[in-house]
């Protein structure tokens, strides 16, 4: 009987061994899959940090507009540095376009109106206050026509431009009838004239540049035609014109054609426009027209309206016959040199079309007529000196081929692979990686909406993406209710802004160690993906956060996506800036070390029992 008992015992042991082996195989299979997914990286640290930072989607972070500041109820274990309000005189402070500092620079070629940022020892380490009575802007499209007076309390333009219908003051609001210096009867009728020549209606023209934009009525009325205009004007005697544009919900920045290149990539805009913008186009050997040529897409359109166009008819009223005749001739000569085709001149509006490639232009290789720019990277523009030279277009094999590749009409181009990506012009980006990243950001945005249900409701009109990559965040939330300023940091590994424009989006190059070219309180929502990791050891974290606070509206929202260790520091500083904050897990779970910090800027205005900083 003993051998039989041993046989039974061996079978039992064998069954147990097999069971153990199967369990171990299953365990290591699951563990391997888990680690491959990315969850296993630093998991114990992530779990501990998750516990410490209360990472969950919590309902008590309020994204609604109340016009009064909710008091934070969070108690932080570590002492937080509290930033005091700046003095009331800094209500409209622009750190890189300060009027007093500007006067120290030469006036030649508008140098004094360009960016001149405060040195480190002059930076403000305080919170820019909103003016008394500040309220949330009207929702779009009402904001196009009305702006609360308390938000931009400057009446000078209502007097200076009264005849031209720029802006009118009515009670406690400004009204914008849609007029301009060159179109006092309204931007709509003016755009209809342009559309009779330029294919605006069919989506061929999507991105536009408005130089010397005033209050941006041209860009405002293009929006209903699905055209997105980047408008710019200097901070000058026409107080707050760019600020008015942004309060209206229209894209705009402080800027000027001066001595340095525009902060936009080559071949970006489908259309460029100047309406009595007072830019001396024929001066400096046509340098400004050559800069427009650089940023204009092959086959794009340039519109010039007002003096000197049609000088023969209007010279008596303008009292500048000889000057105007010579000025228009210079413009015609430079346009001919650049091989621009004049497609229309009617009344005081002239329209040229840029060449589609350099093969079709006989002047390109004639160095005696036209010098080529020596830079090998036409997108290297940050503080680069502007020169009177031609930026060569990408080579083609056929006279009818469009340099840089054909672009689809909008909205098809939004999610199509940009030509710069499909031709491998941006190292590290392929068609496959673009499509993968595009889908990933759709997933991220769905997760954002679960936390902030107002994201695409119209609550946020002016949105900024501080580190835009290929523009996939903007593409994922694209809507007529909003627009996104896609910022590509100048220290980013690759200049992707050209691809962003090829998608029918707009943006700008910028260094976040400096102030952005805008007024305070001009953005409703700011998105920052990996910004603080990117700028680690480049400049102080609080410098970037204070600049974010300056350009964010009271009760505006912030979404910061970064590594958890970085976000803990951001959260600590933000808590001293009158921001209500809450950190949440990555949508793939608490073990992913990347987290998302949501914040809402509290409502407060100058003089509300605030002890100001001594500045």
Image (cartoon, rainbow, N blue to C red):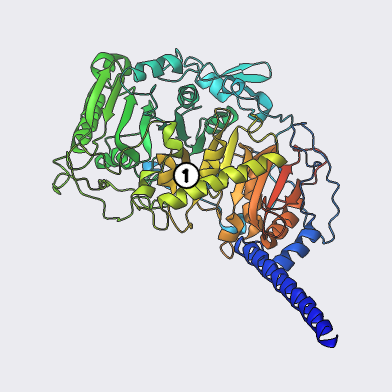
| Residue 27: x %, y % from top left | 70, 68
Please name whichever residue, 286 or 546, is drawn nearer the observer in this view of the structure: 546
**Left or right: 495 in relation to 198:** right
The residue beneath circle 1 is 508
182, above or below 133, in the image: above
Q: In the image, what residue occupies the spot 76% across and 63% down?
A: 47
Outermost residue toward the bottom in this view: 2
Q: Quadrant of the N terminus?
A: bottom right
Number of marks drawn: 1
Outermost residue toward the top in this view: 185
Q: Is residue 211 visible in this depiction of the protein?
A: no
**Residue 419: which quarter of the image?**
top left
Q: Label 1 neighbourhood size at 10 Å, few (<14), some (14-19), many (20+)? A: many
**Residue 28: which quarter of the image?**
bottom right
| Residue 133: x %, y % from top left | 74, 29
| Residue 541: x %, y % from top left | 64, 58
10, above or below 43, in the image: below
Helix, strand or loop status at disc 1: strand
Q: Is residue 434 visible in this depiction of the protein?
A: yes
Please name whichever residue, 339 or 310, is drawn nearer the observer in this view of the structure: 339
Q: In the image, what residue occupies the spot 56% across and 63% down?
A: 538
| Residue 265: x %, y % from top left | 39, 46
Q: In the image, what residue occupies the spot 19% across and 38% down?
A: 337
């Amino acid at each position: 009987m003993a051998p039989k008992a041993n046989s039974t015992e061996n079978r039992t042991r064998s069954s147990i061994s097999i069971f153990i082996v199967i369990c171990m195989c299953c365990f290591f299979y699951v563990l391997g899959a888990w680690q491959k997914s990315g969850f296993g990286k630093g998991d114990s640290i992530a779990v501990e940090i998750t516990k410490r930072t209360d990472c969950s989607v919590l309902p008590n972070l309020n994204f609604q507009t109340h016009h009064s500041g909710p008091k934070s109820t969070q108690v932080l274990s570590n002492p937080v540095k509290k930033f005091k309000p700046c003095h009331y005189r800094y209500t409209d402070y622009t750190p890189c376009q300060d009027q007093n500092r500007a006067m120290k620079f030469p006036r030649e070629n508008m140098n004094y109106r360009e960016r001149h940022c405060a040195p480190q020892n002059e930076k403000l380490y305080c919170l820019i206050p909103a003016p008394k009575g500040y309220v949330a802007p009207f929702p779009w499209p009402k904001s196009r026509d009305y702006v609360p007076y308390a938000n931009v309390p400057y009446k000078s333009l209502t007097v200076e431009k009264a005849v031209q219908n720029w802006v009118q003051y009515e009670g406690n609001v400004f009204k914008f009838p849609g007029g301009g210096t060159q179109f006092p009867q309204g931007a709509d009728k003016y755009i209809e004239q342009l559309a009779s020549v330029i294919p605006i209606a069919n989506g061929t023209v999507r991105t536009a540049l408005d130089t010397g934009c005033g209050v941006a009525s041209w860009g405002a009325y293009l929006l209903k035609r699905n055209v997105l205009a980047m408008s710019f004007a200097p901070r000058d005697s026409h107080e707050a014109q760019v600020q008015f544009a942004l309060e209206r919900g229209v894209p705009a920045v402080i800027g000027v054609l001066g001595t340095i290149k525009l902060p936009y990539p080559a071949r970006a805009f489908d259309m460029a426009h100047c309406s009595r913008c007072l830019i001396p186009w024929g001066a400096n050997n046509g340098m400004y027209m050559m800069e427009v040529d650089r940023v204009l897409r092959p086959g794009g359109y340039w519109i010039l309206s007002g003096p000197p166009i049609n000088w023969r008819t209007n010279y008596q009223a303008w009292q500048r016959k000889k000057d105007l005749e010579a000025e228009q001739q210079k413009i015609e000569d430079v346009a001919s040199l650049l091989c621009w085709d004049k497609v229309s001149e009617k009344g005081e509006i002239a329209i040229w079309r840029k060449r589609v490639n350099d093969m079709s232009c006989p002047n390109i290789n004639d160095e005696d007529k036209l010098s080529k720019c020596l830079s090998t990277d036409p997108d290297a523009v940050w503080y680069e000196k502007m020169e009177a030279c031609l930026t060569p277009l990408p080579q083609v094999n056929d006279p009818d081929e469009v340099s840089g590749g054909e672009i689809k009409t909008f909205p098809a181009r939004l999610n199509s692979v940009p030509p710069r990506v499909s031709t491998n012009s941006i190292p590290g980006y392929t068609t496959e990686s673009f499509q993968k990243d595009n889908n990933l950001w759709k997933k991220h945005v769905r997760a954002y909406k679960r936390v902030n249900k107002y994201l695409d409701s119209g609550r946020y009109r002016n949105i900024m993406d501080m580190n835009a990559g290929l523009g996939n965040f903007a593409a994922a939330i694209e809507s007529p209710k909003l627009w996104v300023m896609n910022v590509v940091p100048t220290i980013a590994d690759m200049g992707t802004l050209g691809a962003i424009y090829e998608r029918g989006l707009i943006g700008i190059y910028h260094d976040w160690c400096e102030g952005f070219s805008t007024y305070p309180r001009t953005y409703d929502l700011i998105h920052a993906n990996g910004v603080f990791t990117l700028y680690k050891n480049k400049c102080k974290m609080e410098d970037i956060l204070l600049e974010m606070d300056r350009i964010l509206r009271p009760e505006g929202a912030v979404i910061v996506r970064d590594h958890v260790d970085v976000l803990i520091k951001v959260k600590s500083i933000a808590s001293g800036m009158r921001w209500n904050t809450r950190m949440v897990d990555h949508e793939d779970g608490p073990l992913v070390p990347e987290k998302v910090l949501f914040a809402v800027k509290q409502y407060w205005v100058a003089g509300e029992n605030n002890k100001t900083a001594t500045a």
